[in-house]
Image: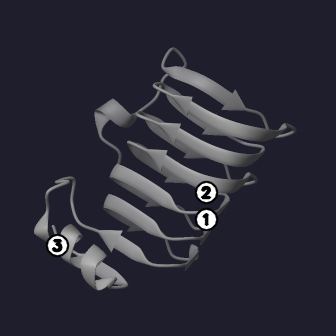
Amino acid sequence: MFSKTAQVNSKQIETIIGQSVKVEGDFVCQGSIIVEGELKGSVKTSDFLKVGAKSLILADVEASEALVSGEIKGDIKVSGYLELTASAKILGNIQAGSISVAKGAMMSGQILVAGQDKNNKAVKKAKEDKEEVVVNE
């Protein structure tokens, strides 16, 4: 599933929001983020994001790669690989380089999957036409 570069060890983790923690604010970082609690605001990392099964994010999310098992109410933008597990619940638009959706995952919003090329013609056309789903690999 995830590339070897996306597999996170404890030395690469920059921020952990524990299960009993509720946070309001904007997170911007270079390292990996693990969210197990509740977060309101925005989340942006140039690395890996893990959203735990019991977590709730009320924010727009941006990451290089992400593994989502919890609930996100906001838009998701992942430049690389996005994996939604069976317990994931997404209420917002999704844009990803590639995506895997497990049986049981819930999504409400537009989905755009167009590879990792930011200059991809399919991405530009979908944005112009506001299409719901574009798959181009």
Q: Decide: few, some or many residues near mark 2? Use Cα within 10 Å; few <14, some 14-19, many ≥20.
A: many
Q: Nearer the viewer, mark 3 or mark 2?
A: 3
Q: Tell which of 116 and 119 is nearer to you.
A: 119
Disc marking residue 122: 3
Say above or below: 15 vs 51: above
Q: Nearer the viewer, mark 3 or mark 1?
A: 3
| 105 on left or right of 113 | right
In this view, which residue lies farthest toward the front? 128
Number of numbered tags placed on the structure image = 3
In this view, which residue lies farthest toward the top? 11
Disc 1 marks which amino acid? Ala
Q: CA distance from mark 3 to mark 2?
A: 28 Å
- SS at circle 1: loop
| 33 on left or right of 99 | right
Q: Position of residue 42 (x, y in %)?
A: 62, 46
Disc 2 marks which amino acid? Ser
What's the coloring here?
Answer: one colour
Say above or below: 51 vs 34: below
Q: Position of residue 90 (x, y in %)?
A: 60, 69
Q: Quadrant of residue 3?
A: top left
Q: CA distance from mark 3 to mark 1?
A: 27 Å
Q: Decide: few, some or many residues near mark 1? Use Cα within 10 Å; few <14, some 14-19, many ≥20.
A: many
Disc 3 marks which amino acid? Ala
Q: Which residue is mark 2?
A: 69
Q: Position of residue 27 (x, y in %)?
A: 62, 34
Q: Position of residue 19 (x, y in %)?
A: 81, 40
Q: Decide: few, some or many residues near mark 3? Use Cα within 10 Å; few <14, some 14-19, many ≥20.
A: some
Q: Which residue is mark 1?
A: 88
Q: Are marks 1 and 2 in contact (CB under 8 Å)?
A: yes
Q: Are marks 3 and 1 in contact (CB under 8 Å)?
A: no
Q: Which mark sits nearer the N-terminus, 1 or 2?
A: 2
